[in-house]
Image (cartoon, grey):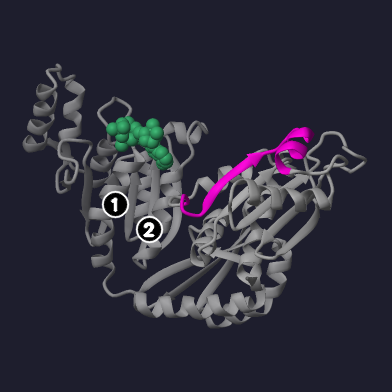
Amino acid sequence: MRCEIVAVGTELLLGQIVDTNSSWLGEQLTTVGVDSHFQTKVGDNHQRIVSVLRQALDRSDAVLVTGGLGPTQDDITREAIAAVLGVDLVTDEAIAATIATRFAARSRPMPANNLRQAQVPVGCTAVTDPFPGTAPGLVCPVGDKVIYAVPGVPSEMRTIVGAVVLPDLARRAGNRGAIVSRTLRTWGESESGIAEKLAGRIDELDDTGAATIAFLASGIEGIKVRITAKADTIEAAQALLDAEEALARAVIGDHVFGVDDDTMESVVVALLRERDLTLATAESVTGGLISARITNVVGVSPVFRGGIVSYATDVKYDLLDLPAGPVVTAEAAELMALGARRVLDADVGLGITGVAGPSEQENMPVGTVFVGLAVGESVTVDQLRLPGTRSQVRDYATISALDMLRRRLLAS
Ligand code: ATP
Ligand code: MG
């Protein structure tokens, strides 16, 4: 079963909005084991939509169109589908009545255009549920193939695709198997380094076809390793994934910090919770970025005591008890970790100090960062030399410090 995606909208071509619908739809198709071979973007132009739909129907079993279903003059997806099918558009009186009622309920006159949304190409089924009266989706059988049309508004699209399109596709696909994927999140190793470690396994998989492994560099958030497996059933595909994940972890090791939607901070918070530890931070170079990321995690309150943005040197002296002297040092980071822990009454203290730039400080070059961690009786300090601009240094320092904390917690 091959399904292809057509995203309609001139604004997609002009770069005014990003076609996130197609990405999401592509991901969904894998969950029902449907192959996805093409994604096309086309403007709001009747002839071009018709030609794209014809081509898609020609080479695929199912076509999933998003956008252009609204009430305005440039929403012409339903006309284009009618042209492709060679049928007329007829008004679905039930939908027309619902639209009229909706305007009446708000005591607003209804622009005639709105009734366009009640028009359905002959032979197609309008999907109004679960949005009675709004731009409905369409299911249009064409011989043993099918065109689905869903709204462009992402939330509406997702609901209709989940409720109607995916189940229908799965039914049409029969028991054709499932494709599942899992993304390992890694930090601290380059893309080429990870690729090298996995090269042997990727070659083996090229021969067996049981799974595929792909890399995605996501800048400051590390390298993502996406494993995709295909099998007759979801359960069998999941088992393949589990096996591949174990093999990948064996070679990538503790650079893997999480899976799928995990973030560095969500993983750190989970580790603190598991160990029943509270955290406090004292940040200089990162100016609160670590606290901000930590507090982004839902349910963090039992583990995060708070953070001190000890930016000025005398604040470090007065509030955190650092002795007068240089503050971009290993000793300063250590005392900041201990000071944060003491002042905020936490189990774990994190102190970070460094030079974000643009100019050096205390004869320390830009990118120098010290991270102190106080966990139980032990206090450790690591020194980093980070590349980039001021904001890159601060972002790298933030995720690096969180990663150090993660590793320390895993070891404790
Ligand atoms: P409406 O009833 O809102 O007119 P529609 O089905 O006609 O719905 P469009 O007019 O094509 O959809 O798009 C409506 C809005 O949905 C766009 O302005 C945009 O914000 C969003 N949208 C449309 N297509 C996409 C897409 N492919 N990816 C992400 N967002 C999209
Ligand atoms: Mg529209």
Q: Residue furthest right?
A: 363
Please name the residue that numbered disc 2 is placed on.
28
Residue segment shown in magenta: 300-320
Q: Is residue 317 above or below residue 332?
A: above
Verify CB contact (< 8 Å) between mark 2 and mark 1. Answer: yes
Residue 257 visible? The answer is: yes
Task: Give the vertical position of 79 relative to 225 (above or below).
Answer: above
Image quarter hosting the C terminus: bottom right
The crowding category of the residue bearing disc 2, from other C-alpha atoms within 10 Å (few below 14, some 14 to 19, many at least 20), is some
* Amino acid tagged 1: Val
**Residue that numbered label 1 is attached to:** 161
Q: Residues within 10 Å of mark 1 (few under 14, many from 20)?
A: many
Q: Is residue 297 left or right of residue 329?
A: left
Q: Residue at 32%, 61% (x, y): give it.
A: 61
With respect to residue 232, does 4 lie above or below? above
Residue at image point 52% right, 33% down:
15
Tell me if I can see residue 44 in this picture: no
User: Would you place residue 163 above or below residue 8 in this image?
Assistant: below
Image quadrant, ligand 1: top left
**Along the line of sight, the residue nearer the viewer: 260 or 6:** 260
Query: Regarding mark 2 in the picture, which secondary structure is present there?
Result: helix
Q: Is residue 90 left or right of residue 191?
A: left
Percent from the top left, x then y, of residue 276? 50, 63
User: What secondary structure is found at the residue carrying circle 1?
Assistant: helix
